[in-house]
Amino acid sequence: PIILAQTKFIQREDLTYPFEERGLQFGDGVYEVIRIYDGKYYLLEEHINRLFRSAEAIKLELPFSKEEITDLLLEMLNKNSMTRDGKLYMQASRGSAPRDHVFPGDVPANVYAYMQDLPRKTDLLKTGVSTITQEDTRWKKCYIKSLNLLPNVLAKQEAKENGCYEAILHEDGLVTECSSSNIYLVKDGNIYTHPATHRILHGCVRMRVEKFAEDLKIPFVEEAFKLESISDADEMFLSSSTSEVLPVTKVDNTVIADGNVGKITRQLQEAYEQDAN
Ligand code: PDD
């Protein structure tokens, strides 16, 4: 058959990308981003556990066990002679099949993973970043790390166009998380962050931040904070596998405290540094 690709008619078999791929047509799949330091994965087990939780939540059968995929990912470091800082991207979709909203029958999942160099953001980690706030327009199952990222993409782009690093998302004034990271507010020695409900992604780094806080005897309060409390915040920071524990020094037009990186944020950054090495 003849199909249309861009503005040209071509033979269907000449289109090289798998257009009837459920990840492409429906965002029907899940993914993970795993940090690599000096050629070693950081929080590998946590990411694999989350991949399986996400897959189960969308009734996607993964073609491997946790042990098998762990071994394959470890082997991949060797195959790529990976000894630097980087990240691994991995996704699993519900396979390729004629387009139909209903799951295809016996179609295997499409899985791929690749790694790339990714230097640490050493400057930003020292100075902090500016952010904007945006309405959280995502669906109600944000704990699933699904391929449907259009609201996240649009929010991040809006941040970029405003000269900012991230977009802080809120639901009716209650802060959930950022477009691709979790967010925290420090007030009177307590760390506040949205509870790990269906409204946010349960970040692997967030789990570590909770542990670091515990070790440092800093109360980790899983209570969503309001947009209004931002102008009163002592410190703010965000976390993700690619951003680590990153200070937030400005939100829209509000400078956080004196605009410098706060003490608790520094302590958590140090704890992260030790944990990741
Ligand atoms: N993003 N919240 C959202 C919406 C995310 O997309 C991410 C990660 C996080 C932080 O999760 P973790 O600590 O496990 O990295 C929170 C990855 C890095 C991405 O999509 O590129």
Image (spheres, rainbow, N blue to C red):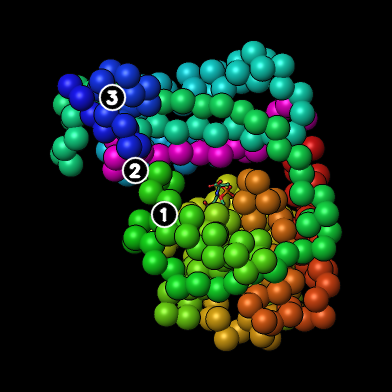
Within 8 Å of ligand 1, the CB of disc 3? no
Q: Is residue 56 left or right of residue 123?
A: left
Front-lying residue, 124 or 161: 161
Q: Quadrant of residue 21?
A: top left
Q: What percent of the width, then of the height, locates residue 210?
A: 63, 57
User: Can the viewer see residue 135?
Assistant: yes
> Between tags 3 and 2, which lies in front?
3
Within 8 Å of ligand 1, the CB of disc 1? no
Q: Does the magenta segment cover residue 68?
A: no
Give the residue drawn at x 70%, y 68%: 130
Q: Residues within 10 Å of mark 2 (few under 14, many from 20)?
A: some
Q: What percent of the width, then of the height, locates residue 255?
A: 74, 80
Front-lying residue, 265 or 148: 148
Q: Which residue is mark 2?
A: 27
Badge 3 amino acid: Ile
User: Can the viewer see residue 110?
Assistant: no
Are the two marked residues, 2 and 1, in contact with CB atoms closer than 8 angstroms?
Answer: yes
> Between tags 1 and 3, which lies in front?
3
Q: Give the Cα distance between marks 2 and 1.
A: 10 Å
Q: Which residue is mark 3?
A: 10
Return the disc, 3 or 2, that comes first in the chain's sequence.
Answer: 3
Q: Is residue 144 left or right of residue 189?
A: left
Which element carries disc 3, helix, strand or loop?
A: strand
Q: Is residue 192 left or right of residue 169?
A: right
Residue 240 numbered mark, or none? none
Q: Give the magenta range.
A: 21-44
Q: Give the Cα distance between marks 3 and 2.
A: 25 Å
Front-lying residue, 185 or 169: 169
Q: Which residue is mark 1?
A: 150
Badge 1 amino acid: Leu
